[in-house]
Image: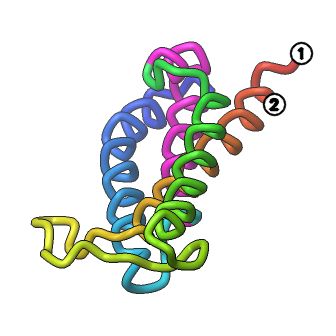
Amino acid sequence: MNTIILQIASRYTLPLLLLFSVFILLRGHYLPGGGFVGGLVASIALVLHAFANGIKKTRELVKIHPGFLMPVGLSTSLLSGLFPMILGKPFLTGMWYPHSVPVIGSLGTALFFDIGVYLVVVGATLTIIFSIIEAP
């Protein structure tokens, strides 16, 4: 699409939607939400940018291939599950840092699992959508 209204709207909504996706990600290990929903919101923001400004500009904005995010996210989630095993606990046992971290709150393995899911969702959805957009 080549409308000035959509281009201007995407310029202002992209940072807001990305910030909202991080909010949902951080909220997820306390309440409903988390990596999956946050990743979808981030993907929607970038797809909106691609529709408004073209896929080339969105790829320049992202700077890395979205397919790279999937193995990084899977590794992050896997490591968050394996970490408790090092300390003799079952796989995927929730472990928490005893002190609160400003802005984030409680820091634990659940947050790192959600971050991994977030990266997998963003990588997978952007890879699929970018492939569809670029298809002849």
Residue 5: x and y in percent read 43, 35
Q: Does the magenta stretch include residue 61?
A: no
Q: Which residue lies furthest to the right in this view?
A: 136
Question: Which secondary structure class fits the magenta region best?
Answer: helix
Chain part drawn in magenta? 37-60
Q: Which residue is drawn at 35% across and 74% down?
A: 27
Q: Is residue 53 left or right of residue 103?
A: right
Residue kind at label 1, given as amino acid type? Pro
Say which residue label 2 marks: 132
Element at label 2: helix
Q: In this view, does 108 lie to the left or right of 61?
A: left
Residue 125: x and y in percent read 69, 44
Element at label 1: loop
Say which residue label 1 marks: 136
Q: How far apart are marks 2 and 1 (CA)?
A: 9 Å
What colour scheme does the image use?
rainbow
Q: Which of 84 and 112 is in front in this view?
A: 84
- Crowding at mark 1 (Cα within 10 Å: few <14, some 14-19, many 20+): few
Q: Residue furthest front?
A: 88
Residue 56: x and y in percent read 57, 13
Quadrant (top left, top right, bottom left, bottom right) of the N terminus:
top right
Res. 85 in view: yes
